Amino acid sequence: MSLPRPDDLTSLVLRTDFGDDTAWDAVRAALDAAGEYPHATYVSELRFADVEVQALLDEEAAADEDAQIIHVFLADATTLREPGHPLLAVDLSDEPGRTFRLPARWFPDVSANLSIANMDFAEFADATDGSGTFRGFEEG
């Protein structure tokens, strides 16, 4: 179950819940509306249904180093069900398995900074609130 490579300067958004196609369409629309430029490579393949984070880590660890990706965003049941469509961000490289939630409105900022290595995963994960959700950086 190798992970697809995201398009250049985008992040992989992997659908893991297949119970509601309308909700999946709404997630993609919210992510696309959140930014001026494309930030996501969407993958909706049944082979990733209910995939666990550990399975993704194992797959990436077994891949050739040149084929590995450093992070992925999961559109799981929580993403499809909750307002704001909070994706599950997963670190596949520096701290494998570390996660945080990310509402669609913040996706372009996080995706862009991770894609160009301007910031690392931990900087966003360390800035989450008590629920483990990134809601932007506090000003001042």
Image: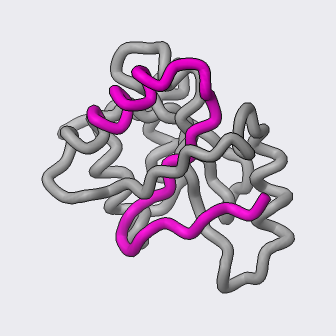
Tally the marks. 0
Quadrant in the rendering for residue 57: bottom right
5 sits to left or right of 128: right
Of all residues, the one furthest to the left in this rendering is: 36
Of all residues, the one furthest to the bottom in this rendering is: 66
Q: Is residue 121 magenta?
A: no
55 sits to left or right of 79: right
Q: Position of residue 96 (x, y in %)?
A: 73, 55
Visible in this render: residue 130?
no
Visible in this render: residue 88?
yes
Q: Is residue 78 above or below residue 28?
A: above
Residue plotted at (76% across, 65% down): 60
138 sits to left or right of 97: left
Q: Position of residue 117 (x, y in %)?
A: 42, 71
**Nearest the eye: 113 or 46:** 46
Q: Position of residue 16 (x, y in %)?
A: 64, 35
Display coloring: one colour
Quadrant into which the C terminus falls: top left
Residue plotted at (61% across, 64% down): 4
Q: Which residues are magenta?
A: 1-30
Residue plotted at (79% across, 58% down): 1
30 sits to left or right of 27: left
Q: Position of residue 8 (x, y in %)?
A: 39, 74
Of all residues, the one furthest to the top in this rendering is: 82
Residue plotted at (85% across, 58% down): 58
Quadrant in the rendering for residue 104: top left
Q: Is residue 89 above or below residue 77?
A: below
**Nearest the eye: 45 or 84:** 45
Q: Is residue 4 magenta?
A: yes
